[in-house]
């Protein structure tokens, strides 16, 4: 039962991140830029972005965005 709960939690977290990514990725490149985040969250700062851009490439990939949503840094919707 515990493993089923963990699997469900992972699925839900992944779904929230995927929803946020698709809503924010306005150019359809599969990545989310600071400008794309700021179009949804106007007061999102460069410092906040740098904090969730764990590989420091200047873009958020699906995993980074999902982690930011799960941590509550970026809203899921």
Image (cartoon, rainbow, N blue to C red):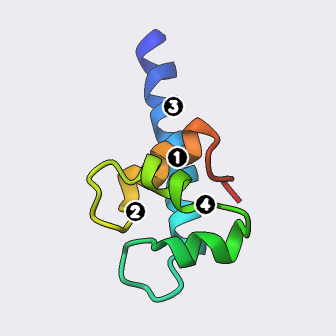
Looking at the image, tell me whether mark 4 or mark 3 is earlier in sequence order.
3
Residues at marks 2 and 3 touching, judged by CB atoms closer than 8 Å: no
Q: Secondary structure at mark 3?
A: helix
Left-right relation of 36 to 14: right
Left-right relation of 27 to 48: left
Q: Looking at this view, is 9 or 52 the one in front?
A: 52
Location of residue 47 in the rendering, given as x and y in whole percent from the top left corner: 52, 54
Looking at the image, tell me whether mark 1 or mark 3 is earlier in sequence order.
3
- Residue position marked by numbered label 3 in the rendering: 8
Label disc, if present, on residue 68 of the rendered structure: 1
Label disc, if present, on residue 45 of the rendered structure: 4
Location of residue 22 in the rendering, given as x and y in whole percent from the top left corner: 53, 72
Q: How far apart in space, not on screen, are marks 2 and 3 (Cα)?
A: 24 Å
Q: Secondary structure at mark 4?
A: loop
Instruction: Rate crowding at label 3 as few (under 14), some (14 to 19) or many (20 or more) other CA atoms within 10 Å.
Output: few
Q: Residue at x 58, y 69 (%)?
A: 37
């Amino acid at each position: 039962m515990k493993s089923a709960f963990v699997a469900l939690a992972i699925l839900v977290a992944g779904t929230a991140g995927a929803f946020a990514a698709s809503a924010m990725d306005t150019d359809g490149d599969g990545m989310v830029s600071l400008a794309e985040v700021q179009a949804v969250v106007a007061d999102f700062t460069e410092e906040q972005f740098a904090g969730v851009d764990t590989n420091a490439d200047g873009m958020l990939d699906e995993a980074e965005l999902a982690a930011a949503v799960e941590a509550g840094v970026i809203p899921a919707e």
